[in-house]
Amino acid sequence: MGLIYLLIFLSLGQLTQWSVARLFGKIVNPKVLARTPNIFFLGSVIIALFMAGWGMVQALSAPGITRIEINHSRLPLALDGINIIQVSDFHAGAIVGASRMKEIVSQINSLDPDLVLITGDIVDMNESGMTGVLAPLKGLRSRLGVFASAGNHEFIAGIDRSSDLLKKSGVRFLRNEGVVIDDGFLLYGIDDSSAARFGGEMPELQKIIGAEARDKFSILMYHRPWGFEEFSKQGIDIMLSGHTHRGQIWPFRYLIDIMFPRSYGLFRYRNSYLFVSRGVGTWGPPMRVGSPPEIVQLTLYASRSSIEESGPD
């Protein structure tokens, strides 16, 4: 990744050098112009190394807490003020190991959650020792339980193995199904759309989210931030997604924004809300530039809707 940054800043340096020569070539000392290639090259190397180092520091820093408060008329009064923690994209494996997982679990528990929802890509690849890496998840403390949905990396690692690993870690894995939580609302988990590439089947939406979603307050975990309008029409009140990492490394954010119009943050359609998290882990290089890790604290109220973020930016 540092090489990519070097190429970017070298290109910018050459463009700047060309511009200086074209605009000021007649008034600037030729000896100064002759030294500019070395100056720009050295500057590019320094900036590239700084960006790469900063990215590694950000990736391994404690996740910031993004606090969201939403008013919803369909929320049962008994659940007013419910504290839901969303965490996404651990990518646990060779880079995000057991010690990092333990730190994140401790941070989640400090928020005293009523419910913990993991929106996919918990595992990274099919690696040995994953049982030990995921073991800290057993330490999650939540009054209403810990649930997860499948991301694309669960299928890359092998969906059956991923399901077994999460079960051993005390996480209930919802695969194209819904459950009733505390007699108050419905919680659905739908497999990532990549399931079809790995021999899985995507059942019709109506067979997963039935008419009951229109009668009860409903939350959906779906890894990719796609289909929000359709899910809303089916009766989903809150949709939680991840996958995008908000680009993870600048300047890839701009490419992700093209691929996913709702690539990060809080969105509303009719009376439904979507939040897309940038996640806590990394895919590929252990770097985050301009997209630090986050844990999302979602509190449902009957009086106001706002979003506030704390932690590193």
Image (cartoon, grey):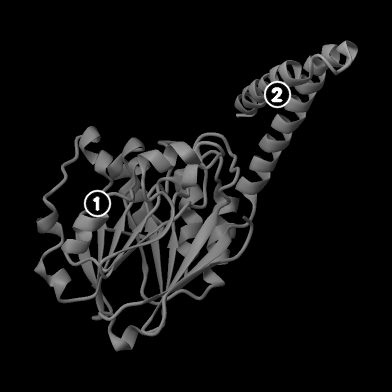
Cα–Cα span, label 1 and label 2: 43 Å
> Dividing the picture into quarters, in which one does residue 228 lie?
bottom left
Whether residue 308 sits left or right of residue 156 in the image: it is: right
Q: Residue at x 78, y 27 (%)?
A: 43
- Name which residue type carries label 1: Gly
Whether residue 36 sits left or right of residue 14 in the image: it is: right
Whether residue 236 sits left or right of residue 119 in the image: it is: left
Q: Neighbour class for label 1 at 10 Å: few (<14), some, many (≥20)? A: few
Q: Neighbour class for label 2 at 10 Å: few (<14), some, many (≥20)? A: some
Q: Which mark is residue 16?
A: 2
> Dividing the picture into quarters, in which one does residue 194 lie?
top left
The quadrant of the image that shows the N terminus is top right
In the image, residue 303 lies at what x, y percent? 39, 85
Q: Earlier in the sequence, mark 1 or mark 2?
A: 2
Q: Residue furthest bottom?
A: 77
The correct choice, above or below, for 263 with respect to 9 in the image is below
Whether residue 174 sits left or right of residue 245 in the image: it is: left
Task: Tell me if I can see residue 155 in this picture.
Answer: yes
- Name which residue type carries label 2: Thr
At mark 2, the secondary structure is: helix
Q: Which mark is residue 227?
A: 1
The quadrant of the image that shows the C terminus is bottom right
The correct choice, above or below, for 48 with respect to 295 in the image is above
In the image, residue 112 lies at what x, y percent? 50, 76
